[in-house]
Each structure stands twice: as C-alpha cells, then as structure tokens.
Image: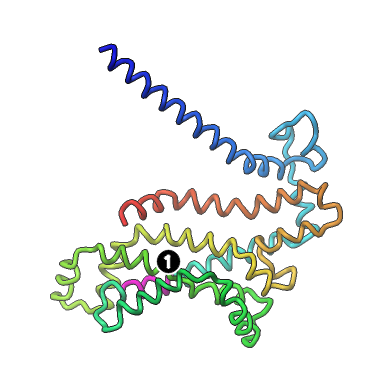
Amino acid sequence: MREVAAAERRRRTARLLVHGALAIASAATLFPLVWMLAAAFTPNDLILARPFRLWPEQATLANFAAASEAYPIWRWLWNSLLAAAAVTAGKLALSLPAAYAFARGRHRWRDAAFGFVIVTMAFPTVMVIVPTYLAVVRLGLVDTLPALIVPSIPYIGFYVFFFRQAMKALPPEMFEAASLDGAGFLRQFVDIALPNVAHVVPALAAFAFLGAWNIFLWGQLTLASVENKTLAVGVALFSDIEGAQSSWGPLMAVNSLAILPVLVVFLVARRSIERAFANR
C-alpha cells in the first residue's frame, strides 16, 4: 500500500509540475498579446510610465483616432476583410469540386493529376512571384484588390488534399445507392459528398481566411496607393511616421485591429478544426 501511495504522489507531483510549466509558458506567450491590447486603450504618454500598469485606470480611444488621422486604417480594415473573404470563397469553390473529382472520379490520369497537385505544395510562392507580377501588370490589375485576390486563389493544394481525404473516407455504398436511384456524378457531389464533409469546411475556411489576411509580401508589391492597402501591409507604414518610436499607442491600436479578426476566426472555428483533424 505504501508503494502504491508513493507512486500516486509521484504521479500527482509530476502532473503538477507539468501543469505549472504549461501555465508559465502560456502566460509568457499571452502576455505580449494582452499588453498590446491594453496599450491600444492606454493614453500614449502612460504606456511606458512607471510604475507599470497593465490596464489603464481610464481606457481611451484616442490611439485609434490618432491612427485614423495618420492613415485610412478603417479603409484598410475593409480591404482586408473583403480580400480575405473573396480568397476564402474562391479557394473553397475550386477545391471542393476538384477534391471530389480526385476522390470519386474514374478518369485515366486522376492519380497523376493529384500527384501534380501535391507536388505544387512543395514549391514556395516566391518561386513564381515574378511571372505572377508580370501577369498582373499586363492585366492592368496593379494597385487594385483583385491583384491581391486573384493570384491567391489558385494555391489550393492543401485544401484539395484535405477535402479529398475526407471524401475518400466516405463509405462507397452511399454513392452506389445514390447511383442506383439515378443520381449522377454531380448530384452525388451535392447530395452526398458535400453534406458529409461539411464539418471540415469551417476549419479549412478558417485556414484560408487567415492565410489571406496575413498576405504581406505580395501586397507590398501590388498595392501602391495608401488607400488600397490592407492592414497587414499598412501597419508597416507606421514605422515611417515621424516620432514613431514614441507613438506606441497608435501602433498598438492598428496592431489590435489587425489581430482581432484573427482571434475571432480562430475562436469560432476552433471546434471545427479539432473535429476536422480528429475525424479526418
């Protein structure tokens, strides 16, 4: 009995140590985010004041007002939301039927084509950034949101792969029964494949949205006008403001605007992400 009790104490101590280490690591990870959000609502001259205070005694929106006076941050927010939503919709619209064709199609070159799609995932986007930029210039899309949206949509290798795996996991008997009832290839896609992989869609939509939201390098190349920039690109402009090193408040306000949609999307899609990867 003593040995059992001693072993239980050791396990309990080990769990406490692990949980304590995880709590410390979580606090260290979250502190910069919490400080950024707090600084966005703190008067600029009090952000680095002593003694340190995480949250101000009286919150203010002055930093957001100062940031909006310097640059059109609300236009940037709208541009970011519009571009991310369009890219997400485009990726889903292309990857779902493509994945179904690879999962249930019977054409001769199906596996070879799918292999090519997988291979494209190994190449970084910077490899094609020059020809893509030249194409955007010839199409007259430079300095417009379509220049950011259109080239981003075809990068769907990951989404095609994941949707295909989810569709291949469906019982073939479901499709055979539908075929006997007269349902064609497209009808089976709409009535069987889509409803049964619906739990995966929010997770991959979240990945697509976050990826589009954080586009920086391509936005720097194609969005020249200040009013056409997205938040991810526009935040960098605050380093050019005279006295920017002392203007922590407006900078943290813009960063908060840039990160809040990311947090919202992750929190909304968290359960779907867990289900998608657990039930793949």
Magenta range: 92-100
Residue visible at 49% across and 67% down in the picture: 88
Residue visible at 45% across and 69% down in the picture: 121
Q: Is residue 47 above or below residue 200?
A: above
The quarter of the rendered structure image containing the C terminus is bottom left
Is residue 270 inside the magenta stretch?
Answer: no
| Residue topped by disc 1 | 158
Is residue 96 inside the magenta stretch?
Answer: yes
Residue visible at 58% across and 62% down in the picture: 213
The answer to whether residue 132 is left or right of residue 191 is: right
Where residue 240 sits, quadrant-wise, is bottom right
Where residue 59 sits, quadrant-wise, is top right
Q: Position of residue 264 (x, y in %)?
A: 53, 51
Front-lying residue, 115 or 151: 115
Amino acid type indicated by mark 1: Phe
Q: Position of residue 212 (x, y in %)?
A: 55, 65
Residue visible at 76% across and 54% down in the picture: 67
Magenta stretch, main secondary structure class: helix
